[in-house]
Image (tube, grey):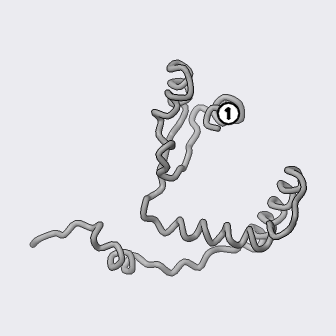
Amino acid sequence: MIRWLVEDVHEEADKIVLVMDNLNTHKLASLYEAFPPEQARRIIERLELHHTPKHGSWLNMAEIELSVLSGQCLDQRIDSKDKLRREVSAWEDERNERQVGVNWQFTTADARIKLRKLYPVIQT
């Protein structure tokens, strides 16, 4: 997939920014396992990677959005890839037109309580 994005889809781009989760295969070293070293290096030089936080509330928002997509759009039989693209695109366009968002209420204060073991303790 990464090779396809870099060499085919965005062949004219100087840099391709990828936001990825922390799956073990989402490491640049995996490109050296899949391709000859020269090709892997060419691909890597055009990538800028950003990994999502391991303990991020963004996951909940993404899961909420996927759940809505499943219930409002994918709750029917879709018999072709083209129809799937049209259905998802129409659903996305309508949602964007209405500027639907997620009313996320998890605050920084909540995070400090829930994730206190991840924050360093400063002794004064």
Write the residue at 54% across / 49% down: 19
Q: Amino acid at mark 1?
A: Trp
Write the residue at 58% across / 39% down: 16
Position in image of residue 121 (x %, y %):
19, 69
Q: In the rendered image, which quarter is residue 17 located in?
A: top right
Residue found at the very far left of the displayed protein: 124
Relative to residue 77, is residue 112 depicted above or below? below
Position in image of residue 62 (x %, y %):
60, 66
Residue 64 relative to residue 23: left or right: right
Residue 53 relative to residue 67: left or right: left
Label 1 neighbour load within 10 Å: few <14, some 14-19, many 20+: few
Residue 119 relative to residue 48: left or right: left
How many marks are shown on the rendered structure?
1
Q: In the rendered image, which quarter is residue 9 located in?
A: top right
Q: Which residue is mark 1?
A: 4
For the N terminus, the quadrant is top right
Position in image of residue 122 (x %, y %):
16, 69
Write the residue at 50% across / 42% down: 25
Please name whichever residue, 13 or 65, is drawn nearer the observer in this view of the structure: 65
Determine whether the residue tagged by mark 1 lies in a helix, strand or loop: helix
Position in image of residue 69 (x %, y %):
73, 68
For the C terminus, the quadrant is bottom left
Relative to residue 30, is residue 24 depicted above or below? below
